Amino acid sequence: MQKFNTLKSIPAYLPIVNIDTDMIIPKQFLKTIKRTGLGKNLFFEMRYDDQGKEINDFVLNQNPYDSSKILIAGKNFGCGSSREHAPWALLDFGITCVISSSYADIFYSNCFKNGILPIILEEEKIKELSEYANRKEEISVDLNDEKIVYGNNEIKFDVDPFKKKCLLEGLDDIALSLKKSEKIESFETDLKNKKPWIFND
């Protein structure tokens, strides 16, 4: 998992509430277990018409938002079924930070596990940031200092210390387990000595 420290980008603003995981990545694209290749299908039903052509009015089909690394979204983002493909699709598109006033719990947790920083802000602050999206101006996100800088202003945000540490160090669930490999090996050795019959073929 890529480390997350600071990020600077023109944000894309998607002012729709209750965007569920099926809207983020529709069910027909869930057959793969690979984390790559899903970006082209992100928000598929909003990005493409029935003939598969891009809908020009959709924000992520427009320059410079088609290269945005920050997505500003409506409240209750990521609701619906608990598919991990949703953060995979966002990440593969290039989005590594989502800003909303609220998230579905499972989606929120999955973001951290996949290298995406989901920031929770009040609606008023989101409206301020959306103006920078509309003006195509960059904002910056500093995870270490837990702040968003836009123009001459800054907004502080809160993030769980453990989740913050995982993002800063690029630690997903597998990496966290590997950090304890010595303890795991020691446990296995001790178990083999005490209960060798468990390991007999």
Image (cartoon, grey):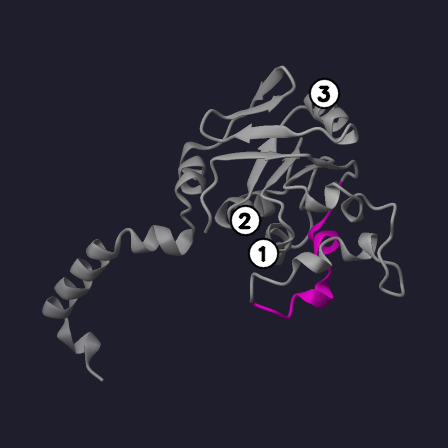
* Position above or below: 53 against 106: below
Q: Earlier in the sequence, mark 2 or mark 3?
A: 2
Mark 2–mark 1 distance (CA, rounded to whole Å): 6 Å
**Residue at x 46%, y 33% (from the top left corner):** 160
Q: Does the segment drawn in magenta span residue 142?
A: no
**Residue at x 82%, y 52% (from the top left corner):** 46
Give the crowd class for mark 3: few <14, some 14-19, many >=20 residues within 10 Å. few
Q: Amino acid at mark 3?
A: Glu
The residue that mark 2 highlights is 110
Q: Is residue 50 left or right of residue 93?
A: right
The residue that mark 3 highlights is 124
The residue that mark 1 highlights is 84
* Position above or below: 31 against 126: below
Q: Nearer the viewer, residue 64 or 33?
A: 64
- Marks 2/1 in contact by CB < 8 Å: the verdict is yes
Work out which residue is located at the far top of the displayed protein and give it. 152
Work out which residue is located at the far left of the displayed protein and give it. 193
Q: Amino acid at mark 2?
A: Asn
Q: Secondary structure at mark 2?
A: helix
Q: Nearer the viewer, residue 103 or 155?
A: 155
* Position above or below: 29 against 113: below
**Residue at x 84%, y 57% (from the top left corner):** 48
Q: Earlier in the sequence, mark 2 or mark 1?
A: 1
Residue 178 location in percent, x, y?
A: 31, 55
Q: Secondary structure at mark 1?
A: loop
Q: Does the segment drawn in magenta span residue 22?
A: yes
- Marks 3/1 in contact by CB < 8 Å: the verdict is no
Q: Quadrant of residue 77?
A: top right
**Residue at x 54%, y 49% (from the top left corner):** 110
Magenta stretch: give its range: 18-33
Q: Amino acid at mark 1?
A: Glu
Residue 156 location in percent, x, y?
A: 55, 21
